[in-house]
Image: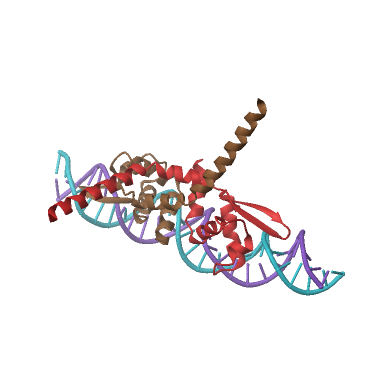
Chain colours: A red, B brown, C cyan, D purple
Amino acid sequence: MVERLDLTFAALADPTRRAMLASLALGERSVGELAAPHAMSFAGAAKHVGVLERAGLVERRKAGRQQLCRLKAERLREADEWLRQWERFWLSTLDRLEAIIVEDQEKLK
Amino acid sequence: MVERLDLTFAALADPTRRAMLASLALGERSVGELAAPHAMSFAGAAKHVGVLERAGLVERRKAGRQQLCRLKAERLREADEWLRQWERFWLSTLDRLEAIIVEDQEKLK
DNA sequence: GCAATATAAAACCATATGGTTGAACGACTC
DNA sequence: GAGTCGTTCAACCATATGGTTTTATATTGC
């Protein structure tokens, strides 16, 4: 699971790959469709698809001469679960912030 | 914000750094305290602290000859918000799984 | 069978990353 | 003032990453 988180977070640390995931959120996409919007060679974009696949975020199936990809959310859920460990920290920070704002408003009265 | 997510996810893609964050969840830690548990040189571990700081996940303050670090959760919250976009995907996957399980149980009756 | 399409695969390049060691520096202790 | 502690910084190394171009391989349509 540790290595899985490594791969997941590393895969998410690139805007091209996050955009590909956003596209896959709308439905299945071929490798070509995933690559098209990005200002780089097809081979370069296809490498990003490979990274997403090795991280377990995407599944491929052959469809004629195309390769259709679809989102696999399980690893995203794992990453989200890990991140939510810290929820209480940002909540408490917001609470403190709110306290300060309320205090300031009191002073204005 | 795009580059911020890059930095955040990249910082999280390493088990040493995630362990350091877990340690910081318990309270302030000096760089030395953060480094100690890890089987690497002090300088190597200090580099990881630097990565966390540049990603905005950690704040430092000087305290005598020590450098005390504390968790800054805001960027973690941003990353979590981004991940939650996909919540419906893993929820629907779990729903389907549950449907299958219920179906199997029906068959056993 | 031939040409075009969709993709994979290989070789290559520049830069980033994760690690090391060793030197330097400011802050305490004596 | 000397030594030690906590830390930074610089130089270095190996490997990974993000990109390129070129070549190869199925698959489809004519």
- Residue B52 shown left or right of residue A77 in the figure: left
Judge by depth and name the residue closer to the eye, A69 or B10.
A69
* Residue at screen point 63% across, 33% down: B103
Where is residue A94 drawn, in percent x and y? 29, 48
- Is B10 situated above or below B92? below
The quarter of the image holding the N terminus of chain B is bottom left
Looking at the picture, tell me which residue is in the foreground, B1 or B102.
B102
Residue B88 point in image, percent of width and height: 51, 48
Q: Which of the 4 image quadrants contains residue D20?
A: bottom right
Whether residue B106 sits left or right of residue B20 in the image: it is right
Q: Is residue B11 visible?
A: no
Is residue B68 left or right of B15 when viewed as pictured? left
Reply above or below: B70 against D25.
above
Q: From the top left corner, tell me how far across and down residue A44 is, in percent.
A: 58, 64
Q: Toward which corner of the image does residue C11 lie, by quadrant?
A: bottom right
Residue A71 vs A2, above or below: the answer is below
Name the residue located 42 percent from the left edge and 49 percent from the top edge.
B80
